[in-house]
Structures are given as structure tokens and as C-alpha cells.
Image: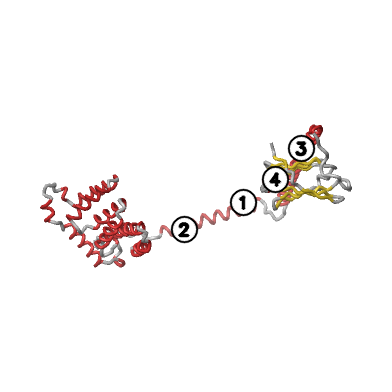
């Protein structure tokens, strides 16, 4: 059931009636207006304004403007005289009469729309027919044009051009036949200077790269012999820092962060020169919220990852991120930003 609009306003002159209907926030595209001689409807769901006009109006000259939250409707009168009121008097006994007026008005409006649609289609059909006739006239005129050469002349021209093309191809084939045979191919053997790092030589830092390789090799050879004797009850595999690192990685992946810390810590006691052990233990401390220990381990990893070269760039990035994350979780944002800038 629509909500009837009652807060409208209207004015009149001797020739025209003006009705102002508030749209209550409705958008212009949602407003539907139907106007006939004796009936006016402005629909914008869920609201409805309906008027059974006091006198007939000229529907062909009627207009409506929708904008600024109102619909302004102009209804030229069929007879120039002053209206006593906008709508006819309605009562319960007039419901059938109003219904009849409404149905008659809507039927008239539908017929008007159908007529306009039919006229538009007929106009388009006439325009297409006119365009086709014009095209046929132009084509006929071109066929009758005296400047068009006869068929025999066209045939002679085609024969001449075809022969000319054949002669040109024959000359081209002759030139190709006169070319000397291709030379015998050979193989050239080349060797490249062996490089441990993939960086181009002009961009490399050879001395620093060699220093990093030497540090890595030395770190692999360095083992705490006193601790090895202390841990003689363990198997040789369990005393291997690489094996302990792999065990710590597996514990971390499964969520056993304390077990991972224990594995990395024992590996560090055996060999204090492997930066990955400190960096990975820093990641465990982050998970356990041991933020100060995470900063210490990440800093130690960065100290061991020197000199900075392409081979350890990814490891330095991981350690820097872990140290910066720990600073930020301690709300030391300036230090965290500095870590990111240094990386």
C-alpha cells in the first residue's frame, strides 16, 4: 500500500496550474509521472501523489521538471478560468468513479506511448528506405558514367601488368642464381672465467666476496672441542650443528618454539660462527615474545653476515626484519625504522 503525499502545494494563473510535489529524498530516475486531461500521478515508491483534476488540462502542452528534491508540474488549462480547487471532491461514494477515471487515464496514457513508439518505428523505416534508394541511385549513376573504361581495355591492361610481373620475377630468380655459394661454417671454442658469485665482474666486489667465502669455510671448520667431549654421550650426528639446525627448523615449522630454541642453542654452543643459527633463534624468540633476546640474536647474526655481499643479502634481510619487528613490538618505532633503512 503506497504512502499518499499530502504536503504538496499548488498555484494557478488564468491559463496554467503549477503543482509542487516534494520527492522526500527520491532520486530523479525513480520518479514516474503520468498526466492526462483529468488525472495526474507522481509515483516515487513508496510514496504516491494522485490528483483527479478539477477541470480538464492540455496534456500535450503539459510539462514536468524534476530536481532539487521536488517535482514541478505545469498544466495548461483547456479553458482560461479560475479554479476553485485543485481536485474534484471525493468521498466514499466516489471511489468507483475515481477508479474509473484512473483506469481511463492509464489506458489513454498507454495508447499514447504505443502511438509514439509506432511513429518512431515508422520514421526509422522511412529513413532506411530513403538511404537505400539514394545508394541505388548513386550506383546506377556510376554504372552509366562514360569515364569507365570498356572490358577489352581492362583485359589488355591486366595482361600487360601480368606479363610485367612475370618478367620481373624471372630477373629476380636470375640474380639469385648468380649469388656465390655460402661459406663453410666453423665452430669457435670459448671458455668463461669461473665465478662463485653470479654478479658481473664489472659490478662485483671480488675482495669482499672472497672474504665472505673464507669466513664461511672457517665457520664450518670451527667446532667447540671441549663441548664435544662434554657431550660424548650423544651420537656424532646429534653433535653436528647442521643436524641441530635442521631439527630446530622442523620444530619451528611444527610450532614447537621452545624445542627449536633448545636445538639452536646447543648448535650455537658447538659453533658460534654460523649466522643462520642466531637469526633463526631470533625468530623463535619473536614467537615467544622474548623481544630483547630476539634483538640480541638478530644483531649477532648481522655482525656475522659481514662483509655485505650478494650471497648473504637475503639472510641479512631476514635478520633485519626480525630485529626491526622486535623493536616495533617494544614500541621503539624509531629504532625499528633505522633498522629498515640500514638494511
Reading the image, the residue beneath label 4 is 31
Marks 2,3: beta carbons within 8 A: no
Quarter of the figure that contains the C terminus: bottom left
Report the number of numbered marks.
4
Horizontal side of residue 208 vs 227, given as left or right: right
Reading the image, the residue beneath label 3 is 106
Reading the image, the residue beneath label 2 is 172
The mark that comes first in sequence, 4 or 2, is 4
- Residue closer to the observer: 190 or 20: 20
- Residue closer to the observer: 51 or 290: 290
Which one is in front in this view, the residue at disc 3 or the one at disc 1?
3
Q: CA distance from mark 4 to mark 3?
A: 16 Å
Q: In which quarter of the view is residue 301 placed? A: bottom left
Q: CA distance from mark 2 to mark 3?
A: 82 Å
Horizontal side of residue 290 vs 105, given as left or right: left
Which one is in front in this view, the residue at disc 2 or the one at disc 3?
3
Horizontal side of residue 214 vs 161, given as left or right: left
Q: Position of residue 179 (x, y in %)?
A: 39, 60
Which one is in front in this view, the residue at disc 4 or the one at disc 3?
4
Q: In which quarter of the view is residue 3 placed? A: top right
Q: CA distance from mark 4 to mark 2?
A: 77 Å
Few, some or many residues within 10 Å of mark 4 (<14, 14–19, 20+): some
- Is residue 240 shown to the viewer in this render? yes
- Is residue 184 shown to the viewer in this render? no
Q: Position of residue 291 (x, y in %)?
A: 31, 56
The mark that comes first in sequence, 3 or 1, is 3
Q: CA distance from mark 1 to mark 2?
A: 26 Å
Reading the image, the residue beneath label 1 is 155
Instruction: Tell me the number on the disc at residue 305.
Output: none
Which one is in front in this view, the residue at disc 4 or the one at disc 2?
4
**Colour mode?**
secondary structure
Amino acid at each position: 500500500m503506497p504512502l499518499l503525499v499530502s504536503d504538496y502545494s499548488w498555484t494557478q494563473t488564468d491559463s496554467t496550474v503549477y503543482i509542487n510535489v516534494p520527492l522526500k529524498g527520491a532520486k530523479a530516475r525513480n520518479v514516474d509521472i503520468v498526466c492526462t486531461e483529468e488525472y495526474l500521478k507522481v509515483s516515487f515508491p513508496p510514496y504516491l501523489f494522485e490528483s483527479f483534476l478539477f477541470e480538464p488540462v492540455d496534456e500535450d502542452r503539459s510539462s514536468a521538471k524534476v530536481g532539487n528534491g521536488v517535482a514541478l508540474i505545469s498544466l495548461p488549462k483547456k479553458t482560461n478560468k479560475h479554479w476553485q480547487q485543485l481536485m474534484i471532491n471525493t468521498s466514499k461514494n466516489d471511489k468507483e468513479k475515481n477508479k474509473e477515471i484512473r483506469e481511463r487515464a492509464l489506458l489513454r496514457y498507454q495508447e499514447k506511448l504505443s502511438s509514439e513508439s509506432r511513429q518512431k518505428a515508422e520514421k526509422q523505416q522511412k529513413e532506411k528506405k530513403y538511404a537505400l534508394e539514394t545508394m541505388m541511385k548513386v550506383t546506377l549513376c556510376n554504372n552509366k558514367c562514360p569515364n569507365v573504361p570498356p572490358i577489352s581495355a581492362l583485359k589488355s591492361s591486366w595482361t600487360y601488368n601480368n606479363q610485367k610481373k612475370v618478367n620481373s620475377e624471372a630477373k629476380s630468380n636470375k640474380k639469385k642464381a648468380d649469388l656465390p655459394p655460402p661459406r663453410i661454417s666453423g665452430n669457435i671454442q670459448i671458455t668463461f672465467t669461473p665465478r662463485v658469485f653470479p654478479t658481473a665482474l664489472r659490478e662485483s666486489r671480488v675482495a669482499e666476496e672472497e672474504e665472505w667465502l673464507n669466513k664461511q669455510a672457517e665457520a664450518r671448520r670451527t667446532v667447540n672441542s671441549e663441548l664435544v667431549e662434554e657431550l660424548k654421550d650423544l651420537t656424532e650426528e646429534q653433535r653436528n650443528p647442521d643436524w641441530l639446525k635442521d631439527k630446530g627448523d622442523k620444530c619451528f615449522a611444527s610450532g614447537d618454539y621452545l624445542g627449536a630454541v633448545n636445538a639452536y642453542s646447543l648448535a650455537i654452543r658447538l659453533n658460534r660462527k654460523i649466522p643462520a643459527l642466531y637469526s633463526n633463534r631470533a625468530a623463535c624468540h619473536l614467537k615467544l615474545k622474548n623481544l630483547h633476546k630476539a634483538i640480541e640474536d638478530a644483531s649477532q647474526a648481522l655482525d656475522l653476515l659481514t662483509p655485505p655481499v650478494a650471497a648473504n643479502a637475503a639472510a641479512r634481510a631476514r635478520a633485519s626484519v626480525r630485529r626491526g619487528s622486535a623493536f616495533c613490538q617494544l614500541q621503539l618505532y624509531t629504532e625499528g625504522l633505522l633498522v629498515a633503512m640500514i638494511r
